[in-house]
Image: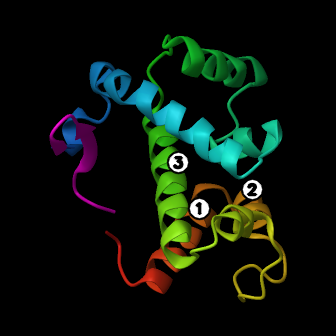
Amino acid sequence: MAEHLPVGTGGGFETIPPDKRSDKDVRKTMSLPAIRAFFNVADRWELLVEERRGLLGWPGASTYHKYRQGAKTGDIPALTYDALIRISLVLGMFKALHILYSEQSLADRWIKLPNKNPIFAGSSPLAFMMASGIDGMYQVRRLLDARRGGWN
């Protein structure tokens, strides 16, 4: 994993050193744009609530609904570092899929389609990630990035 976590700013990216990752104010700054982006991707992928919760690391149902409401109102608590990493992985997958597949509908459906790649054993990438947790999410992200030729 990268030494620094990139954080978007108005003019580009800055990095968050590892010793600042537990800083609640730093995570709070990233939380609203991250959760909004996550829900936008989840909507494009047509994910069910349980699938969304699984990708976020299984927050409680009430916490998930607070995130959903907060994404709309702008009032969201600081996400955990784990949740921010998971969202980053989802956003990277979304980007890679839209680079790999010019047909947007295929790029958005891919996550739910049965896949012959040996890591999926015929199931969908989403089912694999739901069963494998964050490790599975990293594997899918790496697979997609390798197929598109980079981790940019």
- Say which amino acid is labelled 2: Met
39 sits to left or right of 142: right
The residue that appears at 49% across and 53% down in the rendered structure is 91
**Image marks 3 and 1: residues in contact by CB distance under 8 Å:** yes
Point out the tag, 2 or 1, that comes first from the N-terminus. 2
Q: CA distance from mark 2 to mark 1?
A: 9 Å
In the image, 127 versus 72, the foreground residue is 72
Residue type at mark 3: give it.
Arg
Residue closer to the observer: 133 or 29: 29
What residue range appears in magenta?
A: 1-13
Q: Earlier in the sequence, mark 3 or mark 1?
A: 3
Residue beneath disc 3 = 86
Q: Give me the residue at 50% from left, 10% from top.
A: 75
Looking at the figure, which quarter contains the N terminus? bottom left
Whether 90 is among the magenta residues is no
Coloration mode: rainbow
Report x, y in % for residue 90. Answer: 55, 53
Residue 137 is labelled as 1
Q: Position of residue 128 (x, y in %)?
A: 75, 67
Image: 36 above or below 130: above
Disc 3 secondary structure class: helix
Q: Secondary structure at mark 1?
A: helix
Q: Which residue is mark 2?
A: 130
